[in-house]
């Protein structure tokens, strides 16, 4: 009885430790969450979410991936406003929840391994950086980790509720990003490797194996299987319904009442088949057209692999070494290797090799899909070091203790140095391996805040864009309509969020006319045109910014701000 109480006490302590780690993860992700200026991709998607919130019209666009963030952030924007903090909040909350997934695997892991797994999910620099970034990669990884955990828990407990929870997590993963299919293929491959390993483990000759046929035992197995099947079939059918309901709710178009859509089902239930068809087959056809039949993956493999490995080494190098230690030790030193450890390592390793094939651009965020699973064997590696270090201490083995301490300090040092430096202090630099090249290299925040303040008190055009690189040949459909929209990202997100009025000019004569007529408080042009602009904007403060960490020749942009019209100066 005492043993049971002791086990329950240890279980409670592990649970409390994991919950405490999750709370720490929440603080780490919320801290300065809105400080970094929006990445090109964040701003692009955030603008479309804001447009959806304003118009009520939505349809699945494969180029910006699944609709999860669009549907959820629309509600967030309506409740809490649209800004860089609220834009990233949902992803940050999902990232903070990652450590809790460790509890789902605790029957397959020791207490030390469970806590270490939770800790690595909380502090790994790659997971931390992209938990503070509005993209679908982290939500996808989080939902798939929870789905795997719930399914493993269902196997361990035989409780149907974990199957339903796993299906919900899997369905939500399908709403985040199309490479959820890559996860499923990777998992099938990992399972095949596990089966192969199981076959290799039994090396007895056929003559030594009991191959006799036992009729009674066979009948009992068939009856037991039939009983199990009868119990699980209703739950599996319900799981299919749950999956479809979630997918349809997220993917179904919203038409603002103009044509049949998810928002018109209450007034026209007969549209349900068409809505389901569009949410499922329609979305699938759009996905195939964009990502399967397109040429997004037509690039050289090795440069993409090199870029991904570089990010992995810089962001999670020490933890990846621990993952290798954990996998090899579990595989070769124990009486029986654990399937879960091998499965996680195979999934992470294959993701490292596979993502350079399927990604359309070099992107550090692709490493998220490998790291989230490699953290489990890394936790096993930590358990190995802890056990051997503890044994060395008990045996007064000073070299063994020193070796364990050195490795621990190296891991803590690497994670801490990269986490603090690359995630918080230097989160926009070209030299930061975690930063994708379309991140603005400079901090636009002070100027953006001044633009907001100036537009609030200005009656004419708030911003004037100049130059054929920033201005479109003909009006587009996105605000500001006169802009070459993609060339000025992330500015459209801030312009739309704060209702700024924008005008454009491509020629010097048109520019001078607009300045004389409306005297806009903010003028933006390429730095190559700054000499001409400065000559016509006497009294404006000039600031140069780079809108991408790469391709600076086309994104080196100068802002001219009339500070005399800022509210604080107007009252002096």
Image: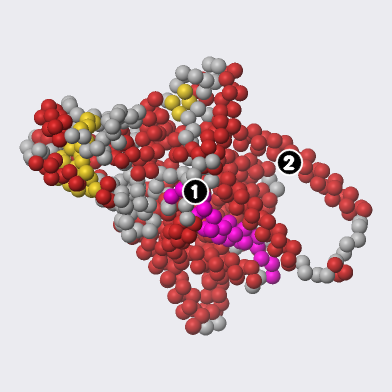
Q: Which mark is residue 232?
A: 2
Residue 415 in the image: above or below residue 527: below
Residue occupied by mark 1: 297
Q: Quadrant of the C terminus?
A: top left
Q: Quadrant of the N terminus?
A: bottom right
Query: In the rendering, at what x and y percent does residue 414 appear?
Result: 40, 66
- Dot 1, crowdedness within 10 Å: few (<14), some or many (≥20)? some
Of helix, strand and loop, which mostly describes the magenta segment?
Answer: helix
Q: Nearer the viewer, residue 85 or 183?
A: 183
* Part of the protein shown in magenta: 335-361
* SS at mark 2 in the image: helix
Are discs 2 and 1 less than 8 Å apart at CB? no
Residue 292 in the image: above or below residue 215: above
Indicate which label's residue lies in the foreground, 2 or 1.
1
Query: In the rendering, at what x and y percent does residue 390 appear?
Result: 54, 75
Q: Quadrant of residue 228?
A: top right
Colouring rule applied to residues? secondary structure
Q: Residue at x 33, y 44 (%)?
A: 38
Q: Is residue 368 visible?
A: no
Q: Residue at x 61, y 48 (%)?
A: 184
CA distance separating discs 2 and 1: 41 Å
Q: Is residue 434 magenta?
A: no
Q: Which badge, 2 or 1, comes first in the chain's sequence?
A: 2
Q: Is residue 344 magenta?
A: yes
Query: In the rendering, at what x and y percent does residue 565 appear?
Result: 12, 35
Q: Quadrant of residue 47?
A: top left
């Amino acid at each position: 009885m005492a043993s049971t109480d002791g086990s329950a006490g240890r279980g409670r302590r592990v649970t409390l430790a994991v919950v405490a780690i999750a709370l720490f993860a929440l603080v780490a992700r919320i801290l300065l969450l809105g400080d970094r200026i929006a990445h090109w991709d964040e701003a692009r998607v955030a603008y479309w979410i804001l447009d959806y919130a304003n118009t009520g019209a939505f349809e699945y666009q494969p180029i910006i991936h699944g609709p999860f963030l669009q549907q959820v952030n629309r509600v967030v924007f309506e409740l809490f406003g649209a800004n860089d903090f609220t834009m990233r909040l949902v992803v940050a909350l999902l990232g903070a929840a990652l450590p809790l997934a460790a509890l789902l695997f605790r029957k397959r892991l020791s207490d030390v391994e469970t806590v270490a797994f939770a800790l690595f999910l909380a502090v790994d620099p790659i997971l931390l950086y992209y938990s503070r970034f509005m993209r679908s990669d982290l939500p996808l990884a989080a939902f798939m980790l929870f789905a795997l955990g719930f399914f493993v828990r269902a196997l361990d407990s035989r409780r149907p509720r974990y199957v339903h929870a796993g299906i919900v997590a899997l369905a939500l993963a399908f709403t985040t990003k199309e490479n959820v299919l890559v996860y499923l293929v990777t998992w099938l491959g990992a399972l095949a490797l596990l089966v192969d390993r199981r076959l290799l483990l039994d090396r007895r000759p056929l003559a030594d194996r009991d191959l006799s046929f036992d009729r009674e035992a066979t009948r009992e197995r068939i009856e037991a299987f039939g009983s199990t099947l009868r119990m699980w079939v209703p739950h599996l059918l319900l799981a299919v319904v749950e999956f479809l309901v979630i997918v349809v709710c997220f993917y179904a178009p919203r038409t603002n009442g103009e044509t049949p859509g998810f928002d018109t089902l209450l007034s026209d239930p007969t549209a349900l088949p068409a809505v389901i068809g569009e949410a499922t087959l329609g979305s699938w056809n759009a996905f195939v057209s964009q990502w399967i039949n397109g040429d997004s993956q037509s690039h050289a493999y090795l440069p993409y692999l090199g870029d991904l490995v570089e990010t992995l080494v810089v962001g999670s190098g020490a933890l990846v070494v621990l993952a290798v230690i954990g996998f090899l030790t579990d595989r070769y030193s124990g009486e029986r290797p654990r399937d879960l450890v091998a499965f996680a390592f195979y999934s992470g390793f294959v993701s490292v090799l596979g993502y350079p094939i399927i990604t359309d651009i070099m992107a550090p965020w692709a490493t998220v899909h490998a790291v989230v699973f490699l953290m489990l064997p890394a936790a096993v590696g930590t358990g190995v070091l802890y056990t051997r270090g503890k044994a060395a201490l008990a045996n007064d083995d000073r070299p063994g203790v020193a070796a364990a301490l050195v490795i621990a300090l190296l891991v803590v040092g690497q994670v801490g140095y990269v986490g603090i430096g690359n995630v918080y202090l230097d989160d926009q630099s070209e030299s930061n391996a975690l930063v994708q090249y379309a991140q603005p290299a400079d901090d636009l925040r002070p100027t953006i805040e001044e633009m907001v303040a100036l537009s609030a008190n200005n009656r004419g055009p708030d911003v004037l864009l100049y130059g054929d690189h920033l201005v479109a040949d003909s009006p587009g459909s996105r605000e500001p309509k006169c802009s070459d929209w993609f060339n000025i990202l992330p500015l459209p997100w801030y312009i739309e969020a704060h209702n700024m009025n924008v005008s454009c000019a491509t020629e010097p004569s048109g520019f001078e006319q607009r300045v004389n007529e409306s005297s806009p408080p903010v003028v933006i042009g390429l730095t190559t045109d700054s000499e001409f602009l400065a000559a016509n904007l006497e009294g404006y403060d000039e600031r140069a910014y780079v809108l991408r960490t790469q391709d600076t020749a086309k994104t080196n942009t100068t802002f001219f701000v009339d500070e005399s019209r800022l509210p604080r100066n107007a009252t002096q």
